[in-house]
Image: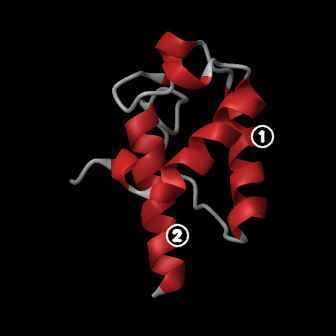
Amino acid sequence: MTNPLADPRSQMILDIVAKETGVDRHALVPEATVEQLGIASLDLTQALFEIETKFDVEIPVLPTTAGQEFVSIGALLAHVLATLDKQAA
């Protein structure tokens, strides 16, 4: 997979995640895990709702692993970008 940060939409997505989760924007790097960042599932869900609103898209839920839909920020970005690309096609 290519670097998700190379996509200009990634910056908007990460800005939303930072705002909704209260996590410093600079800490939101692809390799950082949701657990390491201390992001609560409710905050992540709210961030996804805001991303859906911003991009006018429905982001499907991934099969969960130990209660976490996204293990890392990179996984979150890849999933959102793939959803946006699929909608645009």
Q: Residue at x 57, y 54 (%)?
A: 61
What is the secondary structure assignment of the residue under circle 1? helix
Q: Of the residues shown, which amino acid type is indicated by label 2?
A: Leu
Report, in whole angstroms, how far the alpha carbon at label 2 lies from the one at label 1. 18 Å
Q: Estimate how packed mark 2 is, as few (under 14), some (14 to 19) or many (20 or more) residues with alpha carbons within 10 Å.
A: some
Query: Split into 4 quadrants, where in the image is the N terminus?
Result: bottom left
Of pointers 2 and 1, the one earlier in the residue sequence: 1
Q: Residue at x 48, y 37 (%)?
A: 70
Query: Split into 4 quadrants, where in the image is the C terminus?
Result: bottom left
Q: Left or right of 81: which side holds 40?
A: right
| Tag 2 and tag 1, C-beta contact below 8 Å | no
User: Which residue does the numbered mark 2 point to in the structure image?
Assistant: 84
Q: Left or right of 25: which side holds 71?
A: left
Picture disc at residue 46: 1
Q: Is residue 47 above or below residue 1?
A: above
Q: Residue at x 39, y 38 (%)?
A: 74
Q: Left or right of 50: which side holds 3?
A: left
